[in-house]
Image: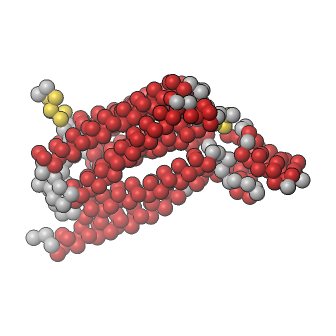
């Protein structure tokens, strides 16, 4: 009896394509042969995908339906550096910072599976620090928009009021995710450093934390394209 | 009883070690892949910034923005989030449900268009 079960599972592992889906679902065992933490994170990220998609879709809807002119984001988020006026510079820097942090996180996951405790922790702290600088720049961006431009969630002197509502909602929710991610990564990094995952015998938590961080970067890709560049 | 025990330990253990790129320690891939994707993401981001910097307009602008966005998103999901190496059952769970969003987007686009025309017809002097 036991041998039959083993045989069934081995044959399931060797088939590819849709047959492997049928095999995974029809076996008398867990459907996803990956750590449960990873599956749960993916389910959470899936729900988050729907939340951010709802925000971006509602932004599309209000931008399509307004009769007021939409502010030129290229000008609104421009910076003047040394007398030179560079459009959208702040957002470009924030994008580069987030991509850099995604890279360091990917390296941290890799080092984690190599059981390199110190490098994993260092790379994760670097990721968290980059995330923190991202939030800092966002705070600067918000301050500029609120104090100098007079934009509010319900008002916008530059044109369509919906700009304020969409901007604060979308970037605010994303910023909240980054802030949460910084805390999450710091906690995991401290645990890496004190050898918690060495004692546990697996570094998969680092990969799960990495999934969350890459998702935050992924959401920014869409916000950058649709809100800032469109 | 014997059956259940074997089954349990097998399901949680190294039985799937050979499946779809899972080594003993999970997702283990050469650093070279990560570095090249990292550089690629920088280049793609620079390109999408250039679209704005050189003030390209109209369909060219939107096409380029969407192309760079989809490429960046694809690389992040496939390589950084390791989806390319996951089993198809997990891939489908992750990638298929968001397709329903296309219905929402289509509905809201129609709705936005309708609201815009109604405003033009009734409220704008």
How far across and how far down the image is residue A176, in percent? 34, 48
Give residue B120's position: percent from left, percent from top.
Answer: 18, 69
Work out whether residue A119 or residue A102 is closer to the camera in this orientation and state it.
Answer: A119
Q: Residue at x 77, y 45 (%)?
A: B10
Q: Which residue is found at the position 50% from the left and 53% from the top?
A: A44
A60 shown above or below A131: below
Which residue occupies the foreground of this view, A34 or B106? A34
Horizontally, residue B24 falls left or right of residue A137, namely right
- Position of B123 relative to B14 (above/below): below
Figure quadrant of the N terminus of chain B? bottom right
Tell me where residue B13 appears, x and y as whole percent: 73, 42
Furthest-bottom residue in this view: B122
The quarter in which the C terminus of chain B is drawn is bottom left
In the image, taking residue B34 as reference, residue B51 lies left or right, namely left
* Colour pattern: secondary structure
Residue at (37% x, 43% y) in the render: A178
Position in image of residue B117 (x %, y %): 23, 70
* Number of marks in the rendered image: 0
On the question of residue B45 being in view, the answer is no
When the figure is inspected, residue A219 is found, relative to residue A160, above or below; the finding is: above
Viewer-proximal residue among A23 and A72: A23
Q: Going by the image, does A159 lie left or right of A206?
A: left
Write the residue at 39% across / 54% down: A52
């Amino acid at each position: 009896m036991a041998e039959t079960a083993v045989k069934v599972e081995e044959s399931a592992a060797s088939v590819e394509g849709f047959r492997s889906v049928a095999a995974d679902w029809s076996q008398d065992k867990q459907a996803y042969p990956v750590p449960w933490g990873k599956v749960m994170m993916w389910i959470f990220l899936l729900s988050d995908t729907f939340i951010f998609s709802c925000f971006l879709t509602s932004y599309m809807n209000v931008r399509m339906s307004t009769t007021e002119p939409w502010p030129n984001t290229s000008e609104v988020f421009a910076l003047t550096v040394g007398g030179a006026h560079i459009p959208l510079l702040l957002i470009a820097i924030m994008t580069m910072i987030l991509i850099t942090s995604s890279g360091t996180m990917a390296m941290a996951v890799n080092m984690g599976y190599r059981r390199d405790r110190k490098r994993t922790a260092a790379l994760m702290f670097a990721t968290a620090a980059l995330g923190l600088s991202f939030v800092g720049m966002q705070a600067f961006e918000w301050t500029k928009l609120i104090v100098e431009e007079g934009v509010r969630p319900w008002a916008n002197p530059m044109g369509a009021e919906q700009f304020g509502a969409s901007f604060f909602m979308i970037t605010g929710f994303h910023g909240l995710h980054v802030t949460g991610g910084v805390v999450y990564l710091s906690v995991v990094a401290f645990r890496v450093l004190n050898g918690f995952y060495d004692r546990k015998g697996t570094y998969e938590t680092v990969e799960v934390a990495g999934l969350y961080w890459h998702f935050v970067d992924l959401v920014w890709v869409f916000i950058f394209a649709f809100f800032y560049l469109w | 009883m014997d059956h259940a025990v074997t089954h349990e330990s097998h399901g949680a253990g190294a039985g799937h070690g050979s499946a779809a790129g899972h080594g003993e320690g999970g997702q283990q891939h050469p650093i070279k892949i990560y570095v090249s994707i990292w550089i690629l993401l920088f280049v793609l981001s620079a390109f999408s910034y250039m679209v704005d910097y050189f003030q390209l307009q109209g369909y060219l602008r939107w096409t380029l923005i969407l192309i760079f966005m989809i490429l960046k998103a694809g690389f992040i999901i496939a390589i950084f989030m390791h989806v390319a190496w996951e089993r198809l059952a997990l891939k489908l769970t992750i990638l298929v449900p968001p397709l329903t969003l296309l219905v929402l987007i289509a509905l809201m686009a129609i709705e936005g268009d309708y609201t815009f025309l109604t405003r033009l017809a009734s409220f704008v002097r």
